[in-house]
Image (spheres, rainbow, N blue to C red):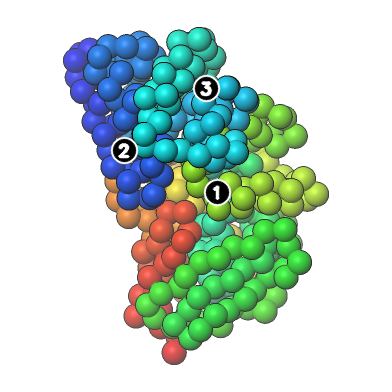
Amino acid sequence: MKKNQTGERIANALEAQIHACDLLGSPLTKAVLEICLENFKADGIVASLTRGWVGDPLDDNVPLRLAGFIHFNALGGDAGLAPHFESCGGVFAADKKPDLARAVLACFIQHEAEARRFFRRTPQTNETGRAGILLLGFSEIARRTELPLRLREMGASAGLNLLFDKFNYEIETANGPVTWGAADSALTISTQWRGAVPPPLQADIEITDRAGCDLFPVAIKDAEARRALEAWVWGDMSARRARLLAALSIADASPPELQRADAAGWVAAQIMQRPPRQTTVLYHSIVWPYLDVSQRMAIESAFAQAGETVTPDAPLAWLKMDHDHIQSFSHLSYRLWTGDNGPEGEDVFIGPCHPHGADIELTEAFDAG
């Protein structure tokens, strides 16, 4: 790709992410990226860091890598950055943006080599708010199969959502408030299930086994890896940060099993080997757009092959809280193979949802009222 084409795509990616920050309510991250965009157009340090990027800057989340590195340094005690970050005890004010700009650019200039290394990390927030949406899928699969669940998460990051049953939930529904989970949990997930009336949640969802994979799993015992995970959460989103810290405290006590593995090969191995008297649930949240076409095709092929061998005593489910590509809307759906419903299984679309788990709009087809 020609240099000017790469530059145009990076600028477009920054502009798209700035717009997303507006929609998602992060004025601080928006300001950081506006500073990056202005410096990029002026052929400054940001241009030096990003112009040689190989791949699609939007799909590869180049803007989030820039913002993540700045937050990483703020969390590390950068005296110029920290006063602007709520996560560091500071506060962002629009009239202080010139001060923020000086601190952002100084950080990139002074730590250029570290920035280039950081950019090799994959942005991953391990957003536990998504558990409030995934819960509906887990409950429905458990209800329909009447079996314990064997959980397998693709793109698990630190594996925090594998511990969904150890969280407490406060859910607003069309039928009024619903609570579920561990009332004494360090983490309470609040979410809204709008639209159609949801089916009653299973009182108890038994988990027989839980494991996940990621190309770059987060070792939460490693201080730098843990700080990087915190850095991907935008610095003015205090509720998201509080959820992450609470979930990390739960994971410290019950660390999930994680493997460093390519998604396609790992998924195939997990869904082809299904122990009896439990339902194997392969799930993922906001992962699908980051897989290349060959990986997606391999995973779909693995499910097609596995679907031909499903038996009633070992059902298979594919639960997705995801979207088709970066700029599309996320939604919750699942495909269930019971051994009695044919090799193609049954697709159930539950509804469009917020990517961080704030709410879901249940479809009328899912109405249990």
Inspect the image, locate mark 1, and give the three-letter code of the amino acid beneath it: Ser
What separation in Å lies between label 3 and label 2 (alpha carbons)?
22 Å
What separation in Å lies between label 1 and label 3 (alpha carbons)?
20 Å
* Residue displayed at 41% across by 18% down: 102
* Residue displayed at 34% across by 80% down: 364
Which mark's residue is nearer the viewer, 1 or 3? 3
Left or right of residue 45: residue 249: right
Which mark's residue is nearer the viewer, 3 or 2? 3
Neighbor class of circle 2 (other Cα within 10 Å; few <14, some 14-19, many 20+) is: many
- Please state which of residues 304 and 334 is positioned toward the viewer in this rendering: 334
Inspect the image, locate mark 2, and give the three-letter code of the amino acid beneath it: Ile
Which mark's residue is nearer the viewer, 2 or 1? 1
Q: At which x and y percent is residue 47?
A: 32, 14
In the displayed image of the protein, which residue is found farthest to the front?
95
Q: At which x and y percent is residue 188?
A: 64, 63
Left or right of residue 345: residue 326: left
- Please state which of residues 10 and 343 is positioned toward the viewer in this rendering: 10
Dot 1 corresponds to which residue? Answer: 238
- Please state which of residues 29 and 68 is positioned toward the viewer in this rendering: 29
Dot 3 corresponds to which residue? Answer: 80
Query: Can I make out residue 59 in this image?
Result: no
- Counting the numbered discs, the total is 3
Neighbor class of circle 1 (other Cα within 10 Å; few <14, some 14-19, many 20+) is: few
Dot 2 corresponds to which residue? Answer: 18
Q: Secondary structure at mark 3?
A: loop
- Please state which of residues 240 and 12 is positioned toward the viewer in this rendering: 240
Query: Can I make out residue 259 in this image?
Result: yes
Label 3 vs 2, first from the N-terminus = 2
